[in-house]
């Protein structure tokens, strides 16, 4: 078909994404070990990111609590 139809939005993003590649010998056990290592690395990366999110969430909650307490104390002092 000429010209080709336009790609759906979801597929058009693929052309802009970074391509990752790695060289592995043509050996199933080597490829399997490589993939297991990559999966473990990615899981660790996501776990670290999730831990940072938890810390940030806790900081926000503590800040909100301190702010609410300060407002309550200020209101009580005005009475």
Image: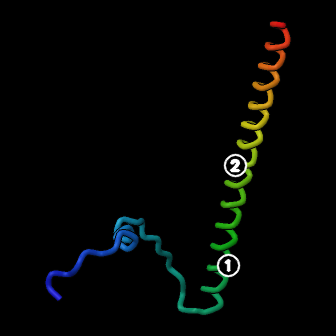
Q: Quadrant of residue 55?
A: top right
> Along the line of sight, which residue is nearer the eye, 36 or 55?
55
Q: Residue at x 36, y 69 (%)?
A: 9
The quadrant of the rendering that contains the C terminus is top right
- Are there few (<14), some (14-19), or many (20+) residues within 10 Å of tag 2? few
Q: Which residue is mark 2?
A: 53
**Left or right: 29 in relation to 51:** left
Q: Residue at x 76, y 37 (%)?
A: 61
How many marks the image carries: the answer is 2
From the top left corner, tell me how far across and down residue 59 is, in percent: 75, 37
**Left or right: 3 in relation to 39:** left
From the top left corner, tell me how far across and down residue 31 is, in percent: 60, 85
The quadrant of the rendering that contains the N terminus is bottom left
Q: Quadrant of residue 5?
A: bottom left
Q: Which disc, if any, is residue 36?
A: 1
> Along the line of sight, which residue is nearer the eye, 14 or 10?
10
Location of residue 75 with respect to 33 vertically, above or below: above
Query: SS class of the residue under badge 1?
Result: helix
Query: SS class of the residue under badge 2?
Result: helix
């Amino acid at each position: 078909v000429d010209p080709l139809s336009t790609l759906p939005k979801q597929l058009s993003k693929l052309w802009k994404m970074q391509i990752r590649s790695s060289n592995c010998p043509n050996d199933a056990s080597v490829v399997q070990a490589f993939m297991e290592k990559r999966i473990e690395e990615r899981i660790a990366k996501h776990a670290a990111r999730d831990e940072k999110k938890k810390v940030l969430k806790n900081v926000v909650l503590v800040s909100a609590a301190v702010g609410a307490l300060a407002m309550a104390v200020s209101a009580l002092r005005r009475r």
